[in-house]
């Protein structure tokens, strides 16, 4: 019966059984990863380089793009390397690092999406006080609080998870290290410590969700009271990208962690994990830039300058 002190590595879930399929998965994941890097990289560059985009909404969007880059870079490169080199192994330290960074970036993204709903609320419901409510100092403080809360949440969960004795081998039923799969390897009673931490996290997540709901109830009430159709359309169009990103993030992660155990199977768990770890970082830049003329204009200006420099 192995315990955590004797485990030097974990075995991740193989994405395919045959060599041909493994290589196919490698190229597929590489394409997805490059798409995410390109999309989030372009948004980050556009916001950082264009002074007209140095507003609270775009500063938060820059943070979101950086978090998405970090999130997908925590999980996919190792999965690609394993598929390419025909292995399943990840070191104990590598697994702990992956858990820490994924949980840190993932929880920070949720807190940031909560702050972004407040930004939308202030824009539509308190336009005259927007500068006071979301000044540069307030924005920096809120963003720092989101990142700080993410670090704290991740430190607590990672330290606790990797202090548990493991009695059920070292095979993780997922393509990356995540806490629920590692808890399955722990001794029967030892994961009770994690449950108390989980209750704390659920309370925090529920509080953020209640705040988001409250913000959007106020937003919809304010929008429906607007006299002009054009005003209503403009207000909805500023909220739609955030609402789409938020819905994708919350629905995929909720299903991943709250689905009934009877539905759990390695193949379904894998599909759901891809949904909440890979799809949002790829889709978020598309959702945010699709109808956003300011970002498109910033990118045109940026590429215009680059082209001019090369002539």
Image (cartoon, grey):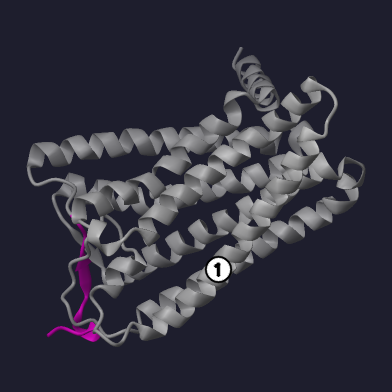
Instruction: Say if 269 sits above or below 54 in the image.
Output: below
Can residue 293 be seen here? The reply is yes
Q: Which residues are magenta?
A: 1-13
Can residue 156 be seen here? The reply is no
- The reply, left or right, for residue 166 in relation to residue 213 is left
Q: Residues within 10 Å of mark 1 (few under 14, many from 20)?
A: some
Residue 5 is covered by the magenta coloring: yes
| Closer to the camera in the image, 43 or 257 | 257
| Closer to the camera in the image, 302 or 138 | 138
Residue 105 locus on image (x, y percent): 51, 58
Residue 45 locus on image (x, y percent): 62, 35
Residue 167 locus on image (x, y percent): 19, 82
Q: Secondary structure at mark 1?
A: helix
Q: Quadrant of residue 48?
A: top right
Residue drawn at 49 percent across, 48 percent down:
249
- The reply, left or right, for residue 42 in relation to residue 185 is right
The C terminus lies in which quarter of the figure? top right
Residue located beneath label 1 in the image: 151
Residue drawn at 40 percent across, 80 percent down:
194
- Tell which residue pokes out farthest to the top in this image: 311
Residue drawn at 65 percent across, 24 percent down:
302
């Amino acid at each position: 019966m192995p315990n955590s002190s004797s485990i030097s590595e974990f075995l991740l879930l193989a994405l395919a059984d045959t060599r041909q399929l493994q290589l196919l998965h490698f190229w597929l994941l590489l394409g997805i990863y490059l798409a995410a890097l390109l999309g989030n990289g372009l948004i980050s560059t556009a916001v950082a380089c264009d002074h007209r985009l140095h507003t609270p909404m775009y500063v938060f969007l820059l943070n979101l793009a950086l978090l998405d880059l970090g999130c997908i870079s925590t999980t996919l490169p190792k999965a690609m390397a394993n598929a390419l080199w025909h292995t399943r192994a990840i070191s104990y330290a590598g697994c702990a690092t992956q858990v820490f960074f994924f949980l840190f970036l993932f929880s920070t993204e949720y807190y940031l999406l909560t702050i972004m709903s407040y930004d939308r609320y202030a824009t539509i419901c308190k336009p005259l006080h927007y500068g006071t409510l979301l000044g540069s100092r307030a924005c920096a403080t809120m963003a720092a609080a989101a990142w700080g809360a993410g670090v704290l949440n991740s430190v607590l969960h990672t330290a606790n998870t990797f202090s548990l004795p493991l009695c059920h081998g070292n095979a993780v039923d997922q393509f990356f290290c995540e806490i629920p799969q590692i808890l399955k390897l722990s001794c029967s009673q030892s994961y009770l410590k994690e449950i108390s931490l989980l209750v704390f996290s659920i309370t925090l997540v529920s509080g953020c969700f209640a705040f988001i709901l409250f913000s959007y109830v106020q937003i919809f009430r304010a929008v429906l009271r607007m006299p002009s159709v054009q005003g209503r359309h403009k207000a909805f169009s500023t909220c739609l990208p955030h609402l789409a990103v938020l819905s994708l993030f919350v629905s995929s992660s909720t299903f991943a962690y709250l689905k009934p155990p009877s539905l759990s199977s390695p193949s379904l768990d894998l599909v759901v994990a891809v949904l909440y770890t890979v799809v949002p970082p790829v889709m978020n830049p598309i959702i945010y830039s699709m109808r956003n003329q300011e970002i498109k204009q910033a990118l045109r200006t940026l590429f215009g300058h680059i082209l001019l420099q090369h002539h």
